[in-house]
Amino acid sequence: MRRQLIGIALAIVMAGALFFAGAWGYLRLLGRSATGGSLSGLPASGSLISDHTVLYGLIAVAGTGLLAGILVAAPRISPLAAGLPGLLLLGWTALYVLSVGHATSLIPLASHSFGAGFKAMLVNGIAGAAGLGMVIPLFVPSRWRSRRRDEEDSADIDADADEYVSGMTPTARQPVPVPAELPARPLQPTVAAGGGRPGGPPMPMPYSGQGYGRED
């Protein structure tokens, strides 16, 4: 809420800069031609830097444009700072299109250079073009969020990304427990083939009483 209140205060400052500095400087650049005069006040040749009237007008318009650019581009400033004056310019331009006399009659200080300069901006379409550029921050969602909220959202995104990456990483396999070695058992002596002792020659087979090649 505090950020939006500061934005409204800056919008009032921006509107004042547009009407006083911007309109006055624009009228100076036109050489008072918007009030019904001619361009005879402008130098026919040479540099405009030597003409203090045009130079002061250029400085006023440039300063107003710089302030409007900062309010539009700075992400920490509420979009209301530039959006509210932009909506005012667009509304005034729309009213001028619908009813020229009614729109010009609402201009304050019409007999002064400030009012005459704003009327020139309205007639030449400068007010409408400036309003279109100044309402852009109103349609950017990130400009409505505070810095603290942006930091919280960024922290949540980082946490989700870390969790996603850790879920994709394969977990280390647990080591399979190796069973303890069984105690060695003593080998039992075995009887060799043929009935002999282990490691010794085989015992002869018992004689059955029948021989080969002998007739009974």
Image: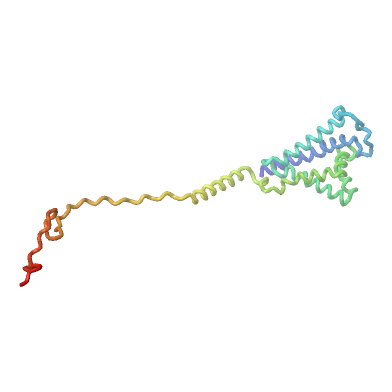
Q: Where is residue 113 in the image (x, y as percent from the top left)?
A: 88, 36
Query: Horizontal placement of 198 versus 141: left or right?
Result: left
| For residue 75, side relative to residue 160 (left or right) | right
Question: Residue 23, image x and y in percent?
Answer: 84, 38
- Based on the displayed image, in which of its 4 quarters is residue 72 positioned? top right
Q: Which residue is drawn at 24% across and 52% down?
A: 182
Q: Is residue 126 above or below residue 56?
A: below
Residue reaching furthest to the bottom: 216
- Residue 19 in the image: x percent, y percent? 82, 39
| Near-viewer residue (92 or 194) | 194
In front of the other: 75 or 103:
75
Task: Name the outermost residue toward the top.
Answer: 50
Reply above or below: 109 against 182. above
Outermost residue on the left side: it is 216
- 150 over 57 or under it: above or below: below
**Residue 67 versus residue 93 in the image, above or below:** above
Closest to the observer: 110 or 157?
Answer: 157
Going 85% across and 50% down the picture, which residue do you hit? 95
